[in-house]
Image (spheres, rainbow, N blue to C red):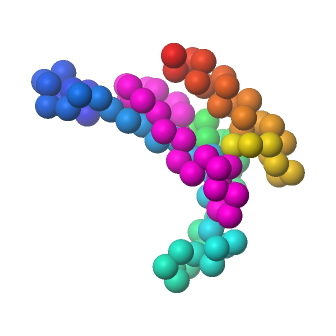
C-alpha cells in the first residue's frame, strides 16, 4: 500500500483495529457458526501495532460500540477500562 501511495495511485491508507469479537449473542449473523475471539487487549494491541507499522494515515476502530458482539471499548465487567486506556495510549502515539 505504501508503494501505491508513493506512486500517487492512492491518497491515504486506513488501518482497522479490533477490540474483540463474539457473535454468539446475535446467533452468528447470517446463520453461520458463531465466532469468539477472547484476546481482549492482546488482539487490540496487535491490530493497533500492525496498522501503525504499515503506515496507516487513519485508523478506524471496528465495531467500537457493538455490545452485542463484545467489541466495545467502553468499560465493561470483562475488561474494566483497559481497552479505553489502550485506545488513549495508541491514539496518542498515532498522532
Residue 67 is one of the magenta-drawn residues: yes
Please report the bounds of the magenta region as a residue range.
47-72
- Identify the residue at image location x=61%, y=41%: 44
Residue lying farthest front? Answer: 65
Can residue 87 be seen in this snapshot?
Answer: yes
- Residue 3 visible in this rendered orientation of the protein: no
Query: Residue 58: image x %, image y %?
Result: 42, 29
x, y percentage for residue 90?
60, 25
- Could you say where residue 32 lies in the image, as x and y percent from the top left? 51, 80
- Name the residue rendered at 51%, 16% in the picture: 95
Residue at 77% in and 36% down? 82
User: Which residue lies at the image location 69% right of the left edge and 31% below the top edge?
Assistant: 86
* Quadrant (top left/top right/bottom left/bottom right) for the N terminus: top left
Instruction: Indicate the quadrant where residue 87 lies.
Output: top right
Is-magenta flag for residue 14? no
Q: Is residue 66 above or below residue 26?
A: above
| Residue 51 position by quadrant | top left
Amino acid at each position: 500500500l505504501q508503494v501505491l501511495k508513493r506512486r500517487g495511485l492512492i491518497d491515504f491508507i486506513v488501518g482497522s483495529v479490533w477490540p474483540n469479537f463474539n457473535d454468539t449473542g446475535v446467533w452468528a449473523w447470517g446463520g453461520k457458526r458463531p465466532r469468539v475471539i477472547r484476546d481482549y487487549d492482546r488482539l487490540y494491541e496487535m491490530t493497533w501495532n500492525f496498522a501503525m507499522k504499515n503506515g496507516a494515515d487513519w485508523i478506524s476502530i471496528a465495531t467500537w460500540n457493538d455490545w452485542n458482539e463484545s467489541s466495545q471499548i467502553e468499560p465493561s465487567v470483562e475488561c474494566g477500562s483497559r481497552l479505553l486506556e489502550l485506545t488513549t495510549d495508541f491514539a496518542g502515539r498515532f498522532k
